[in-house]
Structures are given as structure tokens and as C-alpha cells.
Image: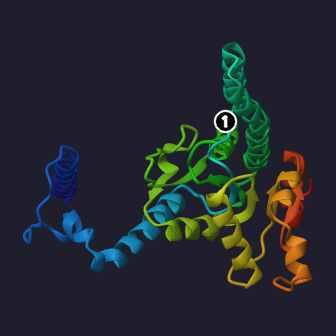
């Protein structure tokens, strides 16, 4: 029985390798009625099979995380465009050497925003330091969108402490792979934003949003909506960088205009340091700070 299982696995692996090479060598795949359905990309990519693809994107990360004991996560959102402090410093040095005024402005901004990269890394280290002292069922794992910038920084902080760290990446027009600090067996790639966001929430015990753009806003407001409407249990929602968020979104105006309730302002908190963010999470779960 074992030999047959290994043989079948070997044949299946070869089949997928052949299909992969065909598609990447410019040889279009032809529909084949005699090909097994689960090994037939022409069939799986049909519009009618979208429900199956949804199920697969739900199931694969679910099984992968469960098998490795990832039950509780702290999700970190934020810009993919912020770079590490050393990279920002090198960019500034190049701009100063060139004397290019526009390049200097961009480099100055990169240095300023690199502070958020550093704070995201610090925050994740605090989470990992705590979790490494807990029993496996009580550990909190850092989870990000798996890309560069703030996501990389958060994965990096947990990686610094030797903790498992999750990345939920997505296929975009500009292809991006998972950053190098994600635990390789916990680096998942999605096609559907909806399934990716579902996985963010399924295990989230806290959500920390650093400054970001459209993607960060999309993720943040989905979380706020789910908690506000009772579709998700209350969790700490932390807006990191009070000046950024208060300049960007006037939540008080929404109260004044009657589009949200005054109590909705209690759904989230502003912080400016990694320790503040971690204390909010610990206080919520009475872990002490």
C-alpha cells in the first residue's frame, strides 16, 4: 500500500511539473476530456469552477496553519512602499551625492517613513518574545500580507525571535513573492482578495494598521465593518501613527454627520510606539503589560 501511495504521488507530481513547464514555455494547454479533473487547469480555470477555486483557497491555508499549530494571530497591515532604515539611509546618501532635488525629496520621505518600518519590527518582536514563553496553544503569531515594506518589517521582527510567522500574499499585476522573513511553510499565495481577507480575520486576536494606501484602507475598513456589525468578535484594532491617521481620516466628522455612532469611535485606538500597541493587546486579553 505504501509503495502504491508513493508511486501515485510521484506520477501526480510529474503531471503538475509537465503542465507547469507547458504553460511557462509558451505552449498553450489544450482542454483534454481524458485528463483527471483535479489535474486539468483548463477545467479548473473555467468560470463554472470558480466555487471550487474558492474552496481550495480557503482549505489550503487553513490546513497548512492548523498543521503547524497557528491558531491565534496578530495581523499587521501597512504600506508595501516603506523601506528599512538602512536602505532609506543609502537612498539619501545617493541623492545627496547626485544633488538631484526631486531625488532628495523622495529620499527624505523614505527616511521619515522608515521609522514605521522600524516600529513594526519592534512591535512584532514584542509579540514573539511573549509568545515564545507560552505553551503552543496560547501563542500569538504575526501574520501579514506577505509583501515588502511594513509587512516585511512585521515578519522580520517575529523572525528575529525565532518564531513562526505567516504571510498571506496575493497575485498582483506586478508580481511579488513572499518576503524572505516568512516561515517558508506558512507562505501562502491567493488569487481572490475576499478569501485572503477572510483568512486574516479567521485567527486574528488583534489587528494593527500602520500607515498605508488603498490596500491597507480596504483591509482596515473591512475589519471595522465586521466588528461594528457583529459579524466578527471584538478584537483590539490599533491605528499606528496617530498623526498620519488623524490627518487622513476625520472619524469625528462621521459622528457629527450621523454616519457612525459615537460609540463606534471606541472600536479602535491610536498609538505611536511599539510598546503602546503591545500593551493595548495585552490589556484587552488581561495578559498584563
User: Which image quadrant is residue 105 in?
Assistant: top right
Whether residue 287 is visible, yes or no, is no
Say how the picture is coloured: rainbow
Q: Nearer the viewer, residue 284 or 28?
A: 28
User: Between residues 178 and 210, which one lies in front from this camera angle?
Assistant: 210
| 151 lies above or below 263 | above
Q: Quadrant of residue 55?
A: bottom left
Image location of residue 120, percent across then percent down: 75, 44
Q: Is residue 191 left or right of residue 228?
A: left
Q: In the rendered view, tell whether residue 179 sits above or below residue 66.
A: above
Name the side, left or right, on which 264 lies relative to 148.
right
Residue 27, x across and y down, in percent: 14, 50
Give the percent coordinates (x, y) of residue 165. Answer: 61, 48
- The answer, for residue 185, to whether it is visible in the render is yes
| Quadrant position of the N terminus in the picture | bottom left
Residue at left offset 18%, top offset 57%: 8
Residue bearing the label numbered 1: 83
- Indicate the position of residue 133 as horizontal and vertical percent values: 76, 47
Say few, some or many: other residues with alpha carbon within 10 Å of mark 1 (under 14 / 14 to 19 / 20 or more): many
Helix, strand or loop at mark 1: loop
* Residue at far front of view: 101
Q: Residue furthest left?
A: 34
| Residue at 73% in and 65% down | 205
Q: Nearer the viewer, residue 232 or 132?
A: 232
In the picture provided, is 260 more to the left or to the right than 80?
A: right
Which residue is located at x 88 percent, y 74 percent? 253
Amino acid at each position: 500500500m505504501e509503495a502504491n501511495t508513493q508511486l501515485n504521488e510521484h506520477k501526480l507530481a510529474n503531471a503538475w511539473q509537465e503542465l507547469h513547464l507547458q504553460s511557462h514555455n509558451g505552449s498553450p494547454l489544450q482542454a483534454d476530456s481524458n485528463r483527471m479533473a483535479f489535474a486539468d487547469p483548463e477545467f479548473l480555470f473555467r468560470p463554472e469552477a470558480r466555487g471550487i477555486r474558492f474552496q481550495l483557497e480557503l482549505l489550503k491555508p487553513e490546513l497548512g496553519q492548523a498543521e503547524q499549530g497557528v491558531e491565534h494571530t496578530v495581523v499587521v497591515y501597512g504600506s508595501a512602499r516603506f523601506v528599512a532604515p538602512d536602505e532609506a539611509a543609502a537612498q539619501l546618501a545617493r541623492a545627496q551625492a547626485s544633488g538631484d532635488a526631486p531625488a532628495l525629496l523622495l529620499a527624505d520621505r523614505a527616511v521619515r517613513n522608515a521609522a514605521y518600518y522600524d516600529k513594526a519590527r519592534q512591535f512584532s518582536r514584542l509579540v514573539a518574545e511573549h509568545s515564545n514563553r507560552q505553551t503552543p496553544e496560547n501563542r500569538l503569531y504575526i501574520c501579514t500580507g506577505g509583501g515588502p515594506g511594513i509587512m516585511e518589517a512585521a515578519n522580520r521582527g517575529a523572525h528575529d525571535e525565532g518564531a513562526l510567522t505567516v504571510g498571506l500574499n496575493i497575485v498582483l499585476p506586478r508580481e511579488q513573492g513572499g518576503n524572505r522573513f516568512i516561515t517558508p511553510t506558512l507562505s501562502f499565495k491567493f488569487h481572490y482578495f475576499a478569501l485572503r481577507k477572510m483568512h486574516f480575520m479567521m485567527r486574528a486576536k488583534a489587528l494593527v494598521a500602520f500607515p498605508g494606501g488603498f490596500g491597507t484602507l480596504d483591509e482596515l475598513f473591512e475589519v471595522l465593518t465586521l466588528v461594528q456589525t457583529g459579524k466578527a468578535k471584538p478584537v483590539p484594532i490599533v491605528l499606528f501613527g496617530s498623526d498620519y491617521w488623524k490627518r487622513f481620516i476625520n472619524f469625528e466628522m462621521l459622528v457629527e454627520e450621523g454616519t457612525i455612532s459615537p460609540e463606534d469611535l471606541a472600536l479602535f485606538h491610536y498609538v505611536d510606539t511599539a510598546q503602546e500597541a503591545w500593551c493595548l493587546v495585552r490589556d484587552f486579553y488581561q495578559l498584563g503589560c
